[in-house]
Image (tube, grey):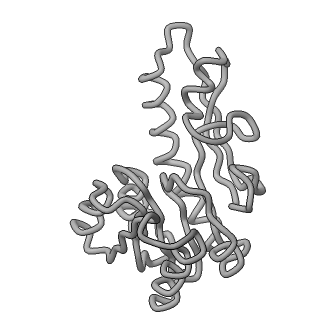
Amino acid sequence: MKKIAIFASGSGTNFENIAKNVKPLNIPCSIELLICDKPGAKVLERAKALQIDSLALSPKDFADKAAYEQEILRALQEKQVEFIVLAGYMRLIGHTLLAAYEGKIINIHPSLLPAFPGKDAIGQAFQAGVKVAGITVHYVDEGMDTGPIIAQQAVQLEDDETRESLEEKIHQIEYELYPKTLVKLFS
């Protein structure tokens, strides 16, 4: 059983989906901790409802990124976390966590990387008029969405596709692919 922490910044739908699929999909992990960079985010309510410990820290309360990540690292070590899963965590991971968890941090991104890295990937794809979009699960490195790709899944855009309908398609693929990818990684 891999001891993991999930990092999230917002509503936490991917976090909740992973947590609710641990038993049904036999994901060989235990979620030890949710890390959130936005105190008051909805994901904290989801963690509480699922009886998963959480830590909410605002980066603004720390002298610098290293101090912020050092506090996170302390909490991860206390829980003996072996692997980090980013699920809508809207910050770049810095040197402190990358050094401690090299090759043990993954992210899900709503595009077929290397296309459309960074913020609002769905909006970028929609504006570019692509015929195919999708999601990527990848290892995290020091760049923005530049780590080695683990899994990808494409989705075809319809002629009458709206940004909202594309977002819904992308989220549905995320909810399927991320848990399945965790099963493969941890088995």
Camera-side residue of 158 and 102: 102
The structure residue drawn at horizontal position 46% and vertical position 39%, both measured from the top left corner, is 171
> Which image quadrant is residue 41 in?
bottom left
In the rendered view, does 110 fall on the left or right side of 103?
A: left
In the rendered view, does 125 fall on the left or right side of 162?
A: right
Image coordinates of residue 169 in percent, x first then y, are 48, 31
> Which image quadrant is residue 150 in?
bottom right
The structure residue drawn at horizontal position 65% and vertical position 14%, both measured from the top left corner, is 129
The structure residue drawn at horizontal position 39% and vertical position 55%, both measured from the top left corner, is 17
Camera-side residue of 87 and 186: 87
Above or below, comparing residue 169 to residue 50 in the picture: above
Image coordinates of residue 32 in percent, x first then y, are 42, 80
Camera-side residue of 49 and 100: 100
Camera-side residue of 96 and 173: 96
Can residue 170 be seen?
yes
Which image quarter holds the C terminus? bottom right
In the rendered view, does 77 fall on the left or right side of 58?
A: right
> Which image quadrant is residue 120 in?
top right
Image coordinates of residue 13 in percent, x first then y, are 37, 50
Image coordinates of residue 52 in percent, x first then y, are 31, 74
Above or below, comparing residue 159 to residue 44 in the picture: above
Can residue 1 be seen?
no
The structure residue drawn at horizontal position 35% and vertical position 62%, both measured from the top left corner, is 20
Spot the residue most to the front: 63
